[in-house]
Amino acid sequence: MAREDSREDERPAHLSRFIDAEQAPGVAELPARLAVTYALLPSNEVDNSDHASVNRFVKALLLPALNGLRRCAPRALRLAA
């Protein structure tokens, strides 16, 4: 018998101290989708095999996107300060 799926099962527990549990799946999805995209469609700007290149990408684009949630997202979606 198949178990009924629930959204609670999909909530990344490790994010619960930073963001509302209801919004955690969406926040976790952004870096996951970016990782898959850059793995399948390599970029001239980011070398996935070079730690420093990936680190620059994360600092320049990913972290500001996630931190931007504090300023522009609805209150329930903002990262904890």
Image (tube, helix red, strand yellow):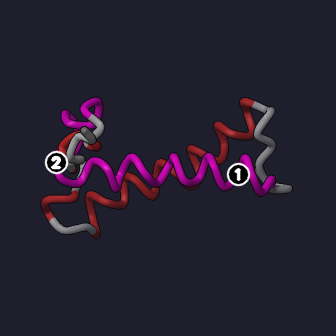
- Image position of 2 (left or right of 54): left
Choose top left, top right, bottom left or bottom right for residue 78: bottom left
Which quadrant would the N terminus be assigned to in this image?
A: top left
Give the numbered dot on residue 52.
Answer: none
Residue to which mark 1 is pinned = 38
Instruction: State whether residue 73 appears in this view.
Output: yes
Give the numbered dot on residue 20.
Answer: 2
Towards the viewer: 49 or 10:
10
Residue drawn at x 23%, y 54% as measured from the top left: 23
Towards the viewer: 81 or 35:
35
Mark 1 lies on a secondary structure that is: helix
Residue drawn at x 46%, y 54% as measured from the top left: 30
Towards the viewer: 37 or 80:
37
Type of amino acid under label 1:
Tyr
Towards the viewer: 76 or 55:
76
Determine whether 53 is above or below 14 in the image: below
Q: Residues within 10 Å of mark 1 (few under 14, many from 20)?
A: few
Q: Which comes sooner in the sequence, label 2 or label 1?
A: 2
Q: Magenta stretch: residue 35 in it?
A: yes
Determine whether 9 is above or below 73 in the image: above
Mark 2 lies on a secondary structure that is: loop
Q: CA distance from mark 2 to mark 1?
A: 28 Å
Q: Which stretch is magenta?
A: 13-42
Residue 73, image x and y in percent? 25, 67
